[in-house]
């Protein structure tokens, strides 16, 4: 009995990135793999040309880890920054963030955000 309980608990704590990655040919895909009352974890999967809309959160941090590919990050004020595998981006409350897969290969970004609940403020796409 104890062994089964531990396995059930561990399944809620351990994840395989390959099990979470799912792409949508029509738009960038956000795959939420866990959520608690305090934080949430998601993997964004972008085909070439797809994007994560420019947005911000009033009271939440949104930390992104690029795990595959190359893209363009939009920190606000019309700026663009190239990002690639291994980059970590910390988006503090109120800071605009968004990105686009500007390469010819798939782009995968892992993110942790909190505290929850988290609002969503969309920014002009220009």
Image (spheres, rainbow, N blue to C red):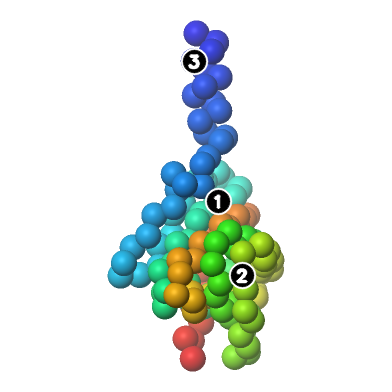
Between 6 and 114, the one lying in front of the other is 6
| Left or right placement of residue 47 versus residue 14 in this view | left
**Is 60 placed above or below 7 here?**
below
Q: Which is more foreground, mark 1 or mark 3?
A: 3
Residue designated by label 3: 4
Circle 1 packing at 10 Å, graded few (<14), some (14-19), many (20+), is some
Disc 2, SS? strand
Measured Cα–Cα span from mark 2 to mark 1? 23 Å
Disc 1, SS? strand
Q: Quick one: label 1 or label 3, which is nearer the N terminus? A: 3
In percent of width and height, residue 63 lies at 64, 61
Circle 3 packing at 10 Å, graded few (<14), some (14-19), many (20+), is few
| Left or right placement of residue 65 versus residue 5 in this view | right
Using the rendered view, name the quadrant where residue 89 is placed.
Answer: bottom right
Residue designated by label 2: 84
Residue designated by label 1: 40
In percent of width and height, residue 20 lies at 45, 48
Query: Which residue is painted at 53% across and 40% down in the image?
Result: 15
**Is 40 placed above or below 64 here?**
above
In percent of width and height, residue 87 lies at 67, 66
Circle 2 packing at 10 Å, graded few (<14), some (14-19), many (20+), is many
Q: Which is more foreground, mark 2 or mark 1?
A: 2
Measured Cα–Cα span from mark 2 to mark 3? 40 Å
| Left or right placement of residue 119 versus residue 76 in this view | left
Which residue is at the far top? 1
């Amino acid at each position: 009995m104890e062994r089964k309980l531990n396995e059930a608990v561990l399944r809620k704590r351990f994840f395989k990135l390959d099990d979470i990655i799912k792409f949508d040919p029509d738009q960038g895909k956000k795959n939420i793999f866990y959520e608690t009352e305090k934080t949430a974890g998601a993997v964004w999967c972008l085909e070439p040309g797809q994007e994560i809309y420019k947005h911000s959160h009033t009271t939440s941090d949104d930390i992104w880890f690029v795990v595959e590919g190359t893209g363009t990050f939009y920190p606000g004020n019309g700026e663009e920054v190239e990002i690639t595998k291994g980059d970590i981006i910390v988006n503090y409350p109120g800071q605009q963030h968004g990105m686009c897969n500007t390469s010819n290969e798939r782009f995968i970004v892992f993110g942790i955000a909190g505290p929850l609940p988290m609002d969503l403020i969309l920014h002009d796409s220009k």
